[in-house]
Image: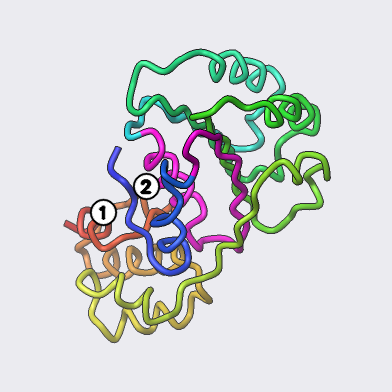
């Protein structure tokens, strides 16, 4: 797994949340922010910072994080890792869709999580769907949108500069939307192929270069 390239506040958080930040401890993180600002990519980047390898990472959508999966995770996280630094990280994207019984099953484990274990969640600000007891177990970071100039710089080289500025100005900070606009522009000009990465919001100059190669 290649670390995702991030811009704006998400990029700054990725640079400081690493194994040194959680020495001799566990990581229990919640990234909150509007859609398309890089929360999922940030979660992936932090997990990779910790594990050093994709082998120690498992990622699911909140709808699929059932109580049965959580119980499997608890058993897995209690065992030692064969890869990377020893870290194991579980990621739940759109954690606000996670069933409440699964949230409850995680509570005691989060309280007694072993060192070199991580749980990272992302949410589009709809925290009312999370139980208060669950929310208080996680260290919350707000992920704000990057500046239009940062988004435009990201897109330049894959679309003309003026087009990049236009997409950046229209997307209201949603990097994923800007990437999709750039992809659509290429399709209309007969030079693009469909990008699953852009749909997920993985943003970065290197990644976009691969998309539109």
Q: Which residue is at 44% across, 40% downward? A: 47
In terms of depth relative to the viewer, which is nearer, 31 or 24?
24
Of the two numbered discs 2 and 1 in the rendering, the one whose residue sits closer to the viewer: 2
Specify the quadrant that holds the N terminus: top left
Q: Which residues are magenta?
A: 22-51
Q: Which residue is at 38% across, 74% downward? A: 151
In terms of depth relative to the viewer, which is nearer, 9 or 28?
28
Q: Tell whether 121 sits left or right of 40.
A: right
Specify the quadrant that holds the C terminus: bottom left
- The tag on residue 89 is none
Q: Please rate how many residues cluster around mark 1, counting C-alpha atoms within 10 Å: few if below 14, some from 14 to 19, many from 20.
A: few
Q: Which residue is at 68% across, 31% downward? A: 110
Q: Secondary structure at mark 2?
A: helix
Can you give x and y, in whole percent of width and height, for residue 66 in the image?
69, 25
In magenta segment, residue 40: yes
* CA gap, disc 2 and disc 1: 10 Å
Q: Is residue 36 above or below residue 130?
A: below
Q: Label 2, on which residue?
A: 196
In terms of depth relative to the viewer, which is nearer, 70 or 48?
48
Q: Is residue 211 above or below residue 134?
A: below
Tell me which corner region of the image, top left, top right, bottom left or bottom right, holds residue 103: top right
Tell me which corner region of the image, top left, top right, bottom left or bottom right, holds residue 70: top right
Q: Label 1, on which residue?
A: 193
In magenta segment, residue 78: no
Can you give x and y, in whole percent of width and height, for residue 174 in the image?
50, 68
In terms of depth relative to the viewer, which is nearer, 198 or 76?
76
Can you give x and y, in whole percent of width and height, for residue 137 in the image?
72, 41
Tell me which corner region of the image, top left, top right, bottom left or bottom right, holds residue 148: bottom left
């Amino acid at each position: 797994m290649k670390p995702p390239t991030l811009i704006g506040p998400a990029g700054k958080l990725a640079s400081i949340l690493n194994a040194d930040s959680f020495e001799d401890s566990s990581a229990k993180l919640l990234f909150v922010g509007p859609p398309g600002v890089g929360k999922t990519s940030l979660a992936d980047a932090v997990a990779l910072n910790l594990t050093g390898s994709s082998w120690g990472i498992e990622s699911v959508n909140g709808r699929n994080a059932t109580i049965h999966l959580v119980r499997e995770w608890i058993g897995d996280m209690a065992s030692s890792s064969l890869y990377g630094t020893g870290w194991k990280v579980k990621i739940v994207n759109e954690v606000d869709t996670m069933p409440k019984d699964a949230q409850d099953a995680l509570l005691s484990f989060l309280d007694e999580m072993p060192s070199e274990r991580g749980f990272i969640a992302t949410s589009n600000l709809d925290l009312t769907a999370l139980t208060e007891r669950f929310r208080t177990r996680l260290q919350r970071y707000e992920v704000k949108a990057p500046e239009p100039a940062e988004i435009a710089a990201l897109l330049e080289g894959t679309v003309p500069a003026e087009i990049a500025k236009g997409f950046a100005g229209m997307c209201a900070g949603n990097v994923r939307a800007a990437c999709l606009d750039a992809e659509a522009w290429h399709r209309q000009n007969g030079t693009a192929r469909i990008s699953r990465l852009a749909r997920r919001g993985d943003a970065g100059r290197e990644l976009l270069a691969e998309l539109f190669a």
